[in-house]
Amino acid sequence: MTYFLMSRRTAAALATSGEVLRLIRTGEAVTRSDLGRVTGLSRPAVSLRVSELIEHGLVVEDSDGPSTGGRPPTRLVFNAAGGVILTAALGASRTQIAVCDLSGTALERTDLAIDVEEGPGAVLPLVLKTWADLLGDRPASLVRGVGMGVPATVEFAAGRAESARVMASWTGVVIPPIIAERFPVPVFVDNDVNVIAIGEHRAAYADQVADLLYVKVSTRIGAGIVAGGQILRGALGAAGEIGHIPVQHGSGVLCRCGNVDCVDSVASGTAILRDLRERGRDVTSLADVVALVRAGDAETMTIVREAGRNLGEVIATAVNVLNPSVVVLGGEVAEAFQPLVGAVREVVYRRSTALATRNLRIELSRLGPGAGITGCALMVVDHVLAPDVIDAGLAAQPL
């Protein structure tokens, strides 16, 4: 009995308004009675916290819930419309910009052709203007946070782009303060593949697996690692740089990082285009390569399959080290070339350990290009709706 009372008191002490919101968001408690039962809070204490969340636009009431006889209980629902998140997924070849609600759903979105190598001085003002245009008549006070993915290694805690050879003018740039001058809210910046991995896992796999490896095969090659349900960034944000793992049977191709035969230099979209041009094919884009594959061009098929085998070699190593439940292949190259995906599967299942591949699935992205926007939004939501952040915000803005 003493232990039971102490447990209830401990739960009640922890059940702040932020914790109550978390319970409502996750569906662990959807009525006032549920909240009292789960937290041990008294009815007046539950009512006080719920009223505070409703007044601040974070929770709404729904009286259309199921009834077991008599008047149905009023359900408490997280109000995803209670704020917006500004997101931008910058890529080397395409950029997506959106305004999302607090569930991560895009409300307004546009895709832009931005050359990120023009540098932050040219790119960031365009992104800021696009956000303002997408917000339209929505008040700026609705903006709760900003999330951005960039094609560079990012020191996440500082929001600093590092090792950005594909966009060298960004190296060393601390991005959040630049954005916060226009939108004074929390700003989070991460590697573009990390945010895609977050979006893919949370939107398509979170209820199935906790360990996922997302590999983006596009102009460049990179990976995002989800371990135990959380993105794995490493000590300085450099986790997932599989593009710079060398392959065994390369032909001495110099990589942009300065090393030789990195998988990025032999299996990326850029590498496939280079190899086809060297063989006399008139290709200027991946669409041209797709046309050759569909036409059954034997040399093109050979190059694409070889790229898949080289990529599979590196992914097999990652599978042995990380033991993910699923490997998700995304990006323009993976989406366009089934022969490359087939070659990756062949090599991974042959070269990884039997235990690591016992239940391993290798799949194409379920979200496609929209995963980056979703991941940027969820990266921000995880912070701005964390219980301690909510409590601090409510304390700063009392009713």
Image (cartoon, rainbow, N blue to C red):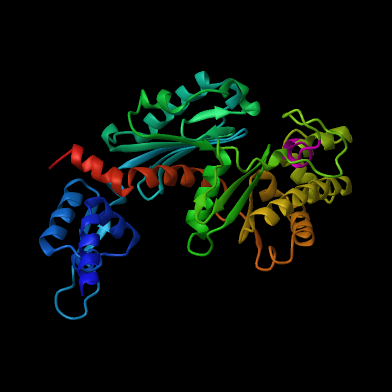
Q: Quadrant of residue 248?
A: top right
Q: Residue 17, relative to residue 86: is it above or below?
A: below
Q: Judge left or right: residue 23 versus residue 150.
A: left
Residue in the picture at 32% in, 57% down: 25
Q: Do we see residue 31 in this rendering?
A: no
Q: Residue 24, relative to residue 157: is it above or below?
A: below
Q: Is 267 colored magenta in this rendering? A: yes
Q: Nearer the viewer, residue 116 or 311?
A: 311
Q: Which segment is the magenta one?
A: 261-270
Residue 72: percent from left, percent from top: 18, 73
Q: Judge left or right: residue 240 versus residue 316.
A: left
Q: Do we see residue 315 in this rendering?
A: yes
Q: Is 132 colored magenta in this rendering? A: no
Q: Judge left or right: residue 2 versus residue 357.
A: left
Residue 97: percent from left, percent from top: 47, 36
Q: Nearer the viewer, residue 81 or 174?
A: 174
